[in-house]
Amino acid sequence: MIDMLVLRIPFKPYLVNERLDSAGNYVAHVDLTEVARRSGLILSAHSVEYAIDGDLTVSGLKHRYESLASHYTGVAFKLFEGGLNCEPCVELKASPAKILQGHNVFGPTDFELCSLEFFGILSESMPDLYELLDIPNTSVSRIDVTFSARVQTQAMANQVINYLRNVSNGQT
């Protein structure tokens, strides 16, 4: 069963600003104000300055995680502006099993089914934003899966458990 799926959907190329920074690193970003204007997204500001003459200066715009409604549970949704080592994208994060059937006792192993459900939820919830995204170039940022296995004896089961205790993912 696919327990957790995180998809990162890039923006269509015409929305992405690319450049090299002073150290020669590739940097890409989208204009959050423009994306919000076209899609209706609500942004928050890190800083708002109010001058005595009535002028407002807003800086540090960002998009906070939101929840997109689905049949049983929400899908976490966030827009990333981009920058060094982070392509501008929309991230969708949820348990496909909970979305499709309301629980994660057992669930789908079909990656395509799970991804299409995510895309459907996004396209129904935010159709204007969906049109700005480069769906065919979506990448998997994270996938957690659970599978059951049977062995012939309890001794073999203990050996498997002991072996798996030494398996690690990421830093050691």
Image (cartoon, rainbow, N blue to C red):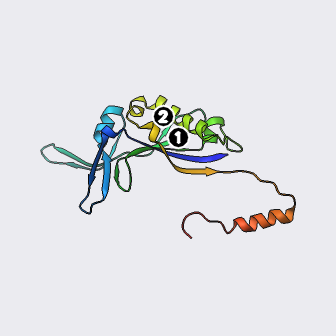
Amino acid on which the number 2 mark rests in the picture = Leu
The residue under label 1 is: 75
Amino acid on which the number 1 mark rests in the picture = Val
54 to the left or right of 170? left
Secondary structure at badge 1 equals strand
How dense is the environment of label 2, judged by Cα within 10 Å: few (below 14), some, or many (20 and up)?
many
Please identify the quarter of the rendering in which residue 116 is found. Answer: top right
Seen at 32% across and 38% down, the residue is 35
37 to the left or right of 134? left
**C-alpha separation, residue under disc 2 versus residue under disc 1:** 9 Å
Q: Which of the two marks, 2 or 1, is nearer to us in this view?
A: 2
Seen at 81% across and 62% down, the residue is 157
Please identify the quarter of the rendering in which residue 95 is found. Answer: top right
Q: Any mark on residue 122, and which?
A: 2
How dense is the environment of label 1, judged by Cα within 10 Å: few (below 14), some, or many (20 and up)?
many
Percent position of residue 164, x then y: 70, 65
Percent position of residue 29, x then y: 32, 48
